[in-house]
Amino acid sequence: MTQRKARTVSYLSRDGILAAKDMETEDVDVPAWGGRVRVRGMTGSERDAFEAALLNNKGQADKRYLLNFRAKLVVLCVVDEEGNRLFADADVGLLGKKSASAIELVFDVARRLSGMSQADLEEMEANLSETPGDGSS
């Protein structure tokens, strides 16, 4: 019988977790915009607020709130070199009028850095199609 070496597990402390530099960024070339943007993932609070903004007052997914869905995420995640957001929430409509392929390019990186999987997006879509009273038959 072979003896296994005991692994030493180091547990994180509260302070260690709170001090961790865990906000990833990635620079993305956007040829349609003529340059590069820096994208960072959402914080936990930002993601919760982002997802909650897609729900109606009954807590159900609502197609009306999906308008400019990608632009909303891009607005939250494009930052300057110091990590400050480039866009205000009020810029969503203006950004939504830009190239869909450029927005999609940045959106894909923002989604990935924010821990949103393709399955998460598909689940949101499925919830929308099951929303009662949306007027479709």
Image (cartoon, helix red, strand yellow):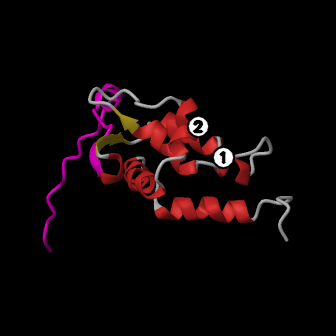
Q: Residues within 10 Å of mark 1 (few under 14, many from 20)?
A: some
Please report the residue visible at 37 percent of the width from the left and 52 percent of the height from the top: 109
Taking the image as drawn, is residue 65 in sight?
Answer: yes
Residue 1's place in the image compared with 20, above or below, is below
Q: Which residues are magenta?
A: 1-30
Q: Predominant secondary structure in magenta? A: loop
Residue 75 versus residue 57: which sits nearer the camera?
A: 75
Left or right: residue 117 compared with residue 1: right
Q: Residues within 10 Å of mark 2 (few under 14, many from 20)?
A: few
**Disc 1 marks which residue?**
54
Left or right: residue 21 compared with residue 6: right
Q: Amino acid at mark 1?
A: Leu
Please report the residue visible at 57 percent of the width from the left and 49 percent of the height from the top: 69
Left or right: residue 14 compared with residue 6: right
Query: Mark 1 or mark 2: which comes first in sequence?
Result: 2
Residue closest to the far bottom: 1
Q: Amino acid at mark 2?
A: Ala
Is 117 within the magenta? no
Q: Position of residue 66 (x, y in %)?
A: 64, 51
- What is the quadrant of residue 94 in the picture? top right
Q: Position of residue 81 (x, y in %)?
A: 26, 30
**Disc 2 marks which residue?**
49
Is 13 within the magenta? yes
